[in-house]
């Protein structure tokens, strides 16, 4: 499912079910104050549908702001502390935001999507 934001800036989000308890959510473009409500809606929809693990792929995201970080933290808190939200975030400016804020120690972060998906399949 692709959804275009009404934001001035380019933002898209897609969802793909991984299995009965996991969902891949992939964001594209700038996830800012204007796009964050659409992003939050997708995360909330996945959680409300019973997903216990979200792999949020930020590989194609060019910008995040504090509103986006709040959306991710809110989803993380709803799912609980044990790998509820796994972030795919390669090195670069977006990853640096997580490092500067210390959120790289809150979220399970992976440079590659395959690594995050492998972590889902690993025994818990």
Image: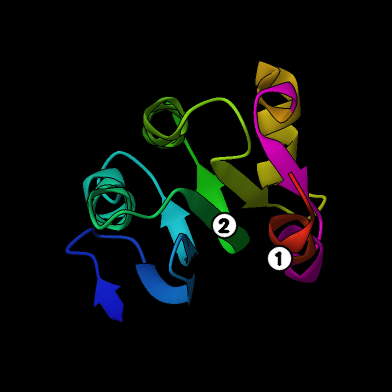
Which quarter of the figure is the C terminus placed in?
top right
Residue 3's label in the rendered image is: none
> Residue 16 vs residue 60: left or right?
left
- Stretch of the chain drawn in magenta: 105-117
Question: Does residue 35 sit above or below 4 in this rendering?
Answer: above
- Secondary structure beneath disc 2? strand
Question: Does residue 123 sit above or below 67 in this rendering?
Answer: below
Residue 55's label in the rendered image is: 2
* Proximity of marks 1 and 2: CB atoms separated by less than 8 Å: yes
Classify residue 98 by image quadrant.
top right
| Percent of width and height locating residue 99 | 75, 27
- Residue at 57% from the left image edge and 25% from the top image edge: 81
> Residue 115 vs residue 102: left or right?
right
Between discs 1 and 2, the one toward the N terminus: 2
89 or 15, nearer to the observer: 15
- Secondary structure beneath disc 1? helix
| Percent of width and height locating residue 21 | 45, 60
Question: Does residue 116 sit above or below 87 in this rendering?
Answer: below
- Residue indicated by mark 1: 117
Classify residue 72 by image quadrant.
top left
Classify residue 79 by image quadrant.
top left
78 or 58, nearer to the observer: 78
Mark 2 is surrounded, within 10 Å at the Cα level, by few (under 14), some (14 to 19) or many (20 or more) other residues, namely: many
> Residue 75 vs residue 115: left or right?
left
Which quarter of the figure is the N terminus placed in?
bottom left
58 or 15, nearer to the observer: 15
Q: Count numbered badges in the picture.
A: 2
């Amino acid at each position: 499912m692709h959804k275009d934001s009404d934001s001035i800036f380019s933002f898209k989000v897609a969802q793909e079910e991984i299995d009965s308890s996991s969902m891949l959510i992939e964001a594209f473009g700038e996830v800012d104050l204007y796009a964050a409500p659409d992003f939050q809606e997708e995360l909330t929809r996945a959680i409300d549908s019973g997903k216990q693990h979200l792999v949020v792929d930020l590989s194609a995201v060019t910008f995040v702001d504090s509103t986006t970080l709040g959306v991710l933290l809110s989803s993380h808190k709803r799912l609980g502390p044990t790998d509820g939200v796994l972030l795919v975030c390669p090195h670069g400016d977006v990853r640096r935001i997580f490092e500067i804020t210390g959120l790289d120690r809150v979220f399970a972060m992976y440079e590659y999507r395959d690594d995050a998906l492998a972590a889902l399949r690993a025994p818990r």
